[in-house]
Image (cartoon, rainbow, N blue to C red):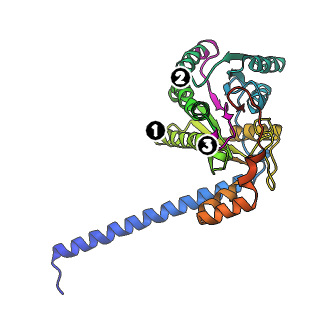
Amino acid sequence: MKYSKMDWNAVLQRVAVILVETLNILQIIAVTLLITVYGAIRACLPASVLGKKTVANEVVLVTGAGSGIGRLLALRFAKLGSKLVLWDVNQKGNEETKNMVQELGAEVYAYTCDITRREEVYRLAKQVKDEAGNVNILINNAGIVIGKNLMDCSDTQIERTMQVNALSHFWITKAFLPAMLEANHGHIVSISSGAGLIGNPGLADYCASKFAANGFAESLALELYKMGKRGIEFTQVCPFYINTGMFDGVASKYITILEPDYAADKIVEAILTNQKVLYMPRLIYPLIALKGLLPVEAAIYLGDSLGALDAMNTFKGRQPQNGSIH
């Protein structure tokens, strides 16, 4: 078979394209492996040897600061020299946290805020900027849980779960992100849940809201990555049940319910080391991997056998008017 000069040029061009594409693929694989190895080594190192950023004089806003993990985070950042901005719908609890922060010598501002009300969020955000300055670290922590099967949840309860646990993240982040973008500096923290990674009976609305919170945080991080805003960090926190009272009565056979101080320490550590994702306890990492690898029927059988599907059977929780709060 004979080829013309033009035919050979086409063949050579095609070979060159294939070689370039192959080299690109090999480069992508190599860099991905290097990053994976680096991440694995970093994950195994104790926090004491990892570089930690300073948050002294940084403005840290914590939602749900009136109790639980929100309060503990506020106190820890106060000890680190940060300026605290506390948001909570519970004025009494928020003022108590404010007093505790003041006793530590930190500058603090407390605002009573219903984060389900978009216009209230925007109004208070402007007030925060005027009084405390631009927020550098935003911790979307506030959350509620109803703890009932779907047909036992009222429509109002379902809507409020989605508003507090997911939609509020949109309004609050939109309110404070512009200043971070302008400075190319900041840190957005989403306190989500292991329930945002895998469903569970009795938590349909809660799981849906936490899946949404995870999707929002991950997508926003990628948006800013593509914009080249590498100075803005993100941390997604997905813990197992924490013993704050929010999930009182929940049953757990094989995974220890987390103590609040331990969880708060780990969250602060993740923020200071710019950790992208924090699952607590570490057992959640292989469990989520198993979810992706196992057939659905096998994953359901495993969860049922380990008692995970019955965890909410004895749930009591704190029962304020609209559900238990972080």
Q: Which residue is mark 3?
A: 150
Q: Residues within 10 Å of mark 3 (few under 14, many from 20)?
A: some
Quarter of the N terminus within the rendering: bottom left
Residue bounds of the magenta highlight:
128-152
Q: Quadrant of residue 108?
A: top right
Whether label 1 touches label 2, CB < 8 Å: no
Q: Nearer the viewer, mark 2 or mark 3?
A: 3
Q: Which residue is mark 1?
A: 227
Can you say whether 315 is above or below 309 in the image?
Answer: above
Which of 301/131 is in front? 301
Q: Nearer the viewer, mark 1 or mark 3?
A: 3
Magenta-colored stretch includes residue 149: yes
Can you say whether 284 is above or below 205 in the image?
Answer: below
Q: Which mark is residue 118?
A: 2
Quarter of the C terminus within the rendering: top right
- Amino acid type at mark 1: Met
- At horizontal 76% and vertical 56% (from top left) the residue drawn is 307
Residue 167: horizontal and vertical position, in percent? 55, 32
- At horizontal 71% and vertical 22% (from top left) the residue drawn is 84
Mark 3 element type:
helix
Q: Residues within 10 Å of mark 2 (few under 14, many from 20)?
A: some
Name which of mark 1 and mark 3 comes first in the sequence: 3
- Amino acid type at mark 2: Arg
Magenta-colored stretch includes residue 62: no
- Amino acid type at mark 3: Leu
